[in-house]
Image (cartoon, rainbow, N blue to C red):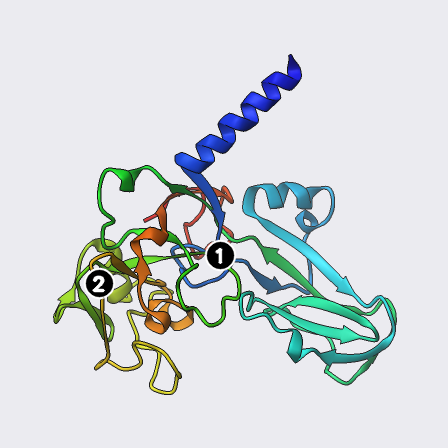
Amino acid sequence: ENLEVIVVAVAVAMAFRTYFVQPFKIPTGSMEPTLYGIHSVAVTNPGIVDRMPLKFFKWFVTGEWYTEIRVKQAGELRYVREDANPENPSIIYVRVGDIRYSIPRDAQLGYRFGEYLRKGDLLCSVIVQAGDHVFVDKVSWNFRRPRRGEVIVFRTDNINIPEVTSPTHYIKRLVGLPNETISIDPPYLVADGVRVTEPPAIARVEDMKEPGYNGYQPVGAHVYGARLKTPGDSIALGEREYLGFGDNTMNSRDGRYWGSVPQANLVGPGWIIYWPFLPKNHETTRGWGRIN
């Protein structure tokens, strides 16, 4: 009987995930400060809550986890450029001896490349902050069309994104609707030659009054293959095509680079942040709650 209950419960959970609500983790900072990806803060003097057993409770509430990376084998400290992963820019790789280490990009290494390190030396100490975990609504778009300003999740298959080698999911702000021509007049978004100033989610990015929002910016004339390099460039969307930008356009790989998203790739609008429960720092009120 217990096995039957477990099987039914798993089946119900999988069906719910497939048809109603699906969880996703935010890996990068392209939607900051609306949504935060995985990042780290260098720490030299960890507090008592960063040590066991209190560090577990801190992680459970805030998503922060203090960690130290120490040398396991003596050798020269080297940067491993060939192992860099464009799909995970928050991590760099270094080697000491024959062992490779994954180091958060924001960490401060205590040594210079080329130095000889001994076993047990401290490479870095950081607080790794988990990316926001969100629920995506997979029901609403069965009854209405996607709206400008919504935070959307979509699959990357059938989209020519150079740095993505295997299908995954992206989360961006919906800025362009079918049959529109989209361009950028910094810091404004322009649709069919008219500046877009609503809904409030779009205006918030353009106003640049809140820290972290820098308006909508073209990627720059030097970027090979990008679609919106300068204010004079535009993207014409088809009948079943949408366009997504990150809220942090200074640090976002989005539709400005690779263009539109087919309607068939859309998964649903972001609904709520379900973890972490509390903000990670005093500069933002983010944490558990509805995505705006």
Q: In the rendered structure, which amino acid carries the disc numbered 2?
A: Gly
- Residue at 55% x, 46% y is 62
Mark 1, other Cα within 10 Å: few <14 / some 14–19 / many ≥20? few
Q: Position of residue 135 (x, y in %)?
A: 43, 42
- Residue at 39% x, 53% y is 154
In this orientation, which residue lies closer to the viewer: 148 or 284?
A: 148
Label 1 sits on residue: 168
Q: Is residue 172 left or right of residue 233?
A: right
Q: Name the disc covering residue 238, or none.
A: 2
Q: In the rendered structure, which amino acid carries the disc numbered 1?
A: Thr
In this orientation, which residue lies closer to the viewer: 72 or 100?
A: 100
Pair 2/1: label in front: 2
Q: Is residue 136 left or right of residue 197?
A: right
Q: Quadrant of the N terminus?
A: top right
Q: Quadrant of residue 202?
A: bottom left
Mark 2, other Cα within 10 Å: few <14 / some 14–19 / many ≥20? some
In this orientation, which residue lies closer to the viewer: 122 or 48?
A: 122
Q: Name the disc covering residue 58, or none.
A: none
Kind of element beneath mark 2? loop
For the residues bearing labels 2 and 1, Cβ distance under 8 angstroms: no
CA distance for labels 2 and 1: 23 Å
